[in-house]
Image (cartoon, grey):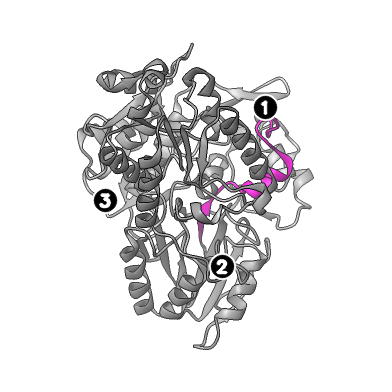
């Protein structure tokens, strides 16, 4: 029994971990390695879809595993594998079966490169993760790197491949844990595409074991609904995977319950994320969602014009916080159509999550567009009594909190915010050079329109948030100390640090001691033997 780590090794995100026990082969996640991808690509420089797998394989973004990927994406380059088989970590899997991918949650650094995996490889996850992943694909850009839930078949024309117009999209086989019957509305959502292309759909099926191996799925707290951790009962013992996890969110009890349940299994190995494990940052405040509510409420109370709130679009917990702030400050929360679509989708699985049609103070931004896709037309139709135009927002700026991000900032010339309006940043840190450049641009936009900003990392402070503005964001990841406490409670025989950089590995090596826990640092493409 062995484990081979591809993505998520020495970097945050891009998780791709292959567990093999005899003839059974299971992946934990299959995400986009954004850090590595960012070394070569940016918004206007992307892998070329006409060449299929060539670019992501050549640039080291996909593990060189022949037989794992879609045949239609190999057509453009007939000798593709002749040039790739010398790559580090190469394996020929043409004559073996991949029994499934265990998908922890719907963030693209964990799901995105499922786009390239063969359609017959089943995906095991929670119903919420399956539905959110579909909503993200439905409302996102049509791109061969984003075909997570359903694929668009490709054909070769000349030297390149392109989408085959006459063939329906192909839905992947999703198996969900804690499966229950879907409502007619939920079923209709699952078996339809948002555009005119037909879909060869496959109903959600219940998840049980995988090829005879018992699998346990645990709900955990993260910054997106439906997040899960997993444990697989192998011939050598239980092997567990944390996914992305935190203990300080409003559902932190789920993560504590996971630790209790996993300890009872006496796991052989735990793959544990270490996003915030850092000796230099130890002792930093561990801000909670309650801190965000209190700090953001105070900032909005002081605002006199428009408030633009910038937070992760799939962070529904944060969206609900700003909906509450809007109520308490006499404003309405205005979300983008894609956010309304996501809320509607999540509501199909968890009725406690409000849909726009049921939340009295949530409105939808009616952005002027020449072309409107069908999913957005449907949202505008369903929420026609809740649509708000830029002109309305400009005329009554003190009546709204507008959910915006850096990629929506170019609407400011239309909105013309009054001097002193507030741009409230409640999202991730400036963790690489590309994002630092985005922060420079964002600040330039905000200050050009004489908006006050709060929570924004500043270059003159070495990309830290000013002391008096901290607490406007709560991380989706546990801090190092909390992770160590979690690990010591679980007591695996082997700890494998993943989804972390070198600083996180050093943190675990220094802080996790005794109790019979040994630390194995993974290397790209090098199998870790976990049992005979």
Looking at the image, tell me whether mark 1 or mark 2 is earlier in sequence order. Answer: 1
Height in image: 43 above or below 1? above
Q: CA distance from mark 1 to mark 2?
A: 40 Å
Height in image: 498 above or below 78? below
Percent from the top left, x then y, of residue 403?
42, 34
Q: Which is more toward the observer, 159 or 504?
A: 504
Residue 340 among those drawn in magenta:
no
Looking at the rendered structure, which numbered label has been put on residue 179?
3
Please say if the residues under marks 1 and 2 sit with CB atoms less than 8 Å apart. no
Quadrant, the C terminus: bottom right
Percent from the top left, x then y, of residue 278?
60, 68
Looking at the rendered structure, which numbered label has been put on residue 50?
1
Q: Is residue 255 left or right of residue 456?
A: left
Residue 356 appearing in the image: yes
Query: Tag 1: Cα neighbours inside 10 Å, few (<14), some, or many (≥20)?
Result: many
Q: CA distance from mark 3 to mark 1?
A: 38 Å
Please say if the residues under marks 3 and 1 sit with CB atoms less than 8 Å apart. no
Q: Residue at x 56, y 80 (%)?
A: 511
Q: CA distance from mark 2 to mark 3?
A: 34 Å
Q: Residue at x 54, y 19 (%)?
A: 413
Query: Tag 2: Cα neighbours inside 10 Å, few (<14), some, or many (≥20)?
Result: many
Q: Using the rendered view, name the quadrant where residue 434 is placed.
A: top right
Looking at the image, tell me whether mark 3 or mark 1 is earlier in sequence order. Answer: 1
Q: Which residues are magenta?
A: 25-48
Residue located farthest toward the top when viewing the structure as drawn: 370
Looking at the image, tell me whether mark 2 or mark 3 is earlier in sequence order. Answer: 3
Residue 36 among those drawn in magenta:
yes
Quadrant, the N terminus: bottom right
Q: Residue at x 33, y 73 (%)?
A: 261
Which is more foreground, mark 2 or mark 3?
A: 2
Instruction: Read off the residue under disc 2.
Output: 277
């Amino acid at each position: 029994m062995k484990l081979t780590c591809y993505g998520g090794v020495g970097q945050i995100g891009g998780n791709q971990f292959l567990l093999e026990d005899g003839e059974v082969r299971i992946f934990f996640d299959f995400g986009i390695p954004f850090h590595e991808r960012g070394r070569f690509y940016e918004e206007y420089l992307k892998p070329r879809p006409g060449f299929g797998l060539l670019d992501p394989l050549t640039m080291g973004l996909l593990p060189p595993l022949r037989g794992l990927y879609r045949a239609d994406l190999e057509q453009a380059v007939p000798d593709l594998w002749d040039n790739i088989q010398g790559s580090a970590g190469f394996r020929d899997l043409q004559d073996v079966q991949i029994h499934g991918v265990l998908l922890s949650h719907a963030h693209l650094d964990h799901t995105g490169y499922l786009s390239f995996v063969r359609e017959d490889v089943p995906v095991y996850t929670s119903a919420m993760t399956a539905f959110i992943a579909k909503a993200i694909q439905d409302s996102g850009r049509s791109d061969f790197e984003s075909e997570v839930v359903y694929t668009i078949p490709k054909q070769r024309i000349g030297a390149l491949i392109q989408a085959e117009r006459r063939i329906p999209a192909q839905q992947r086989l999703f198996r969900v844990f804690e499966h229950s019957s879907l409502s007619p509305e939920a079923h209709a959502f699952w078996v339809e595409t948002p555009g005119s292309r037909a879909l060869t759909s496959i109903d959600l099926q219940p998840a049980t074991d995988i090829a005879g191996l018992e699998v346990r799925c645990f709900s955990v707290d993260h910054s997106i609904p439906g997040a899960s951790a997993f444990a697989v009962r192998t011939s050598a013992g239980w092997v567990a995977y944390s996914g992305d996890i935190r203990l300080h969110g409003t559902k932190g009890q789920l993560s504590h319950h996971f630790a209790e349940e996993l300890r009872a299994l006496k796991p052989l190995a735990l793959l544990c994320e270490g996003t915030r494990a850092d000796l230099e940052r130890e002792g930093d405040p561990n801000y909670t969602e309650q801190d965000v509510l209190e700090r953001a409420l105070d900032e909005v109370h002081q605002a006199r014009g428009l408030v633009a709130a910038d937070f992760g679009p799939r962070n529904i917990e944060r969206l609900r916080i700003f909906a509450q702030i809007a109520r308490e400050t006499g404003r309405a929360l205005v979300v983008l159509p894609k956010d309304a679509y996501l809320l509607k989708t999540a509501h199909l699985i968890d009725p406690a999550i409000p849909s726009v049609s049921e939340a009295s103070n949530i409105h939808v931004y009616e952005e002027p567009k020449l072309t409107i896709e069908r999913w957005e037309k449907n949202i505008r139709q369903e929420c026609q009594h809740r649509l708000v135009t830029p002109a309305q927002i400009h005329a009554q700026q003190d009546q709204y909190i507008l959910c915006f991000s850096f990629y929506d900032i170019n609407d400011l010339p239309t909105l013309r915010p009054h001097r002193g309006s507030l741009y409230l940043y409640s999202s991730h840190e400036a963790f690489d050079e590309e994002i630092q450049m985005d922060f420079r641009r964002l600040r330039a936009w905000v200050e050009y329109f004489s908006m006050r900003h709060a929570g924004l990392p500043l270059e003159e402070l070495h990309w830290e948030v000013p002391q008096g503005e901290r607490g406007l964001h709560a991380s989706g990841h546990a801090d190092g100390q909390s992770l160590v406490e979690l690990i010591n409670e679980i007591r695996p025989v082997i700890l494998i640090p993943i989804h972390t950089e070198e600083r996180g590995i050093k943190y675990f090596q220094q802080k996790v001691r005794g109790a019979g826990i040994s630390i194995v640092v993974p290397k790209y493409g090098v199998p870790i033997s976990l049992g005979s």
